[in-house]
Image (cartoon, helix red, strand yellow):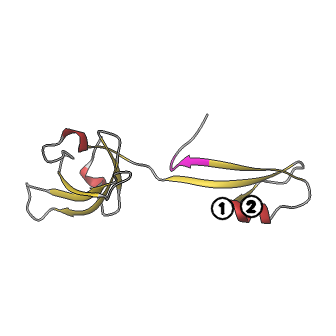
Amino acid sequence: MFDIKDAVPGARFETRDGREAVILVLDEEHAPYVVVVGYIKVPGFEDLLTSWTAEGYGRGVFAVDLVGLVKPKFVQWLNLYGDSRDPEVYNNAADAVRDTHFGHVACVRIEYEEGQFDD
């Protein structure tokens, strides 16, 4: 669900039709007519500049309503070893492969969202 408190410049939201929207500016000076300005990422085309109401409604286009905050995704690589050594964490595959040591068993790619906890 869209929350105006999350609409800060650079914040990423999902539109009702599943596309990613990025907030550029929040105009609160003209309250109660708050306007959120940003762009929608359109694969294969230029980004679409648009605006939303303080409630996240697109200007007459239901499909572009803002429905939720997109959590940042992270990708890291873990070097695993067969002994009791802790895994080593890297932000890119090249560093992980270059920095292997004796007893190396595997290099595992992991992808997760901010705040994700698996059972």
Q: Position of residue 40 (x, y in %)?
A: 30, 53
Instruction: Measure how far apart labels 1 and 2 are at the Cα level.
Output: 7 Å
The magenta span reads 111-115
Mark 1 belongs to which amino acid? Answer: Asn
Mark 2 belongs to which amino acid? Answer: Ala
Q: Position of residue 54 (x, y in %)?
A: 17, 51
- Most extreme residue toward the front is 44
**Few, some or many C-alpha atoms within 10 Å of disc 2 (few <14, some 14-19, many ≥20)?**
some
Q: Is residue 91 above or below residue 83?
A: below
Question: Could you tell me what secondary structure mostly forms the magenta stretch?
Answer: strand
Q: Say left or right for 52 vs 95.
A: left
Q: Tell me the number on the disc at residue 96.
A: 2
Q: Say left or right for 27 vs 111.
A: left
Q: Position of residue 79 (x, y in %)?
A: 77, 54
- Which of the 4 image quadrants contains residue 32? bottom left
Q: Say left or right for 46 vs 57.
A: right
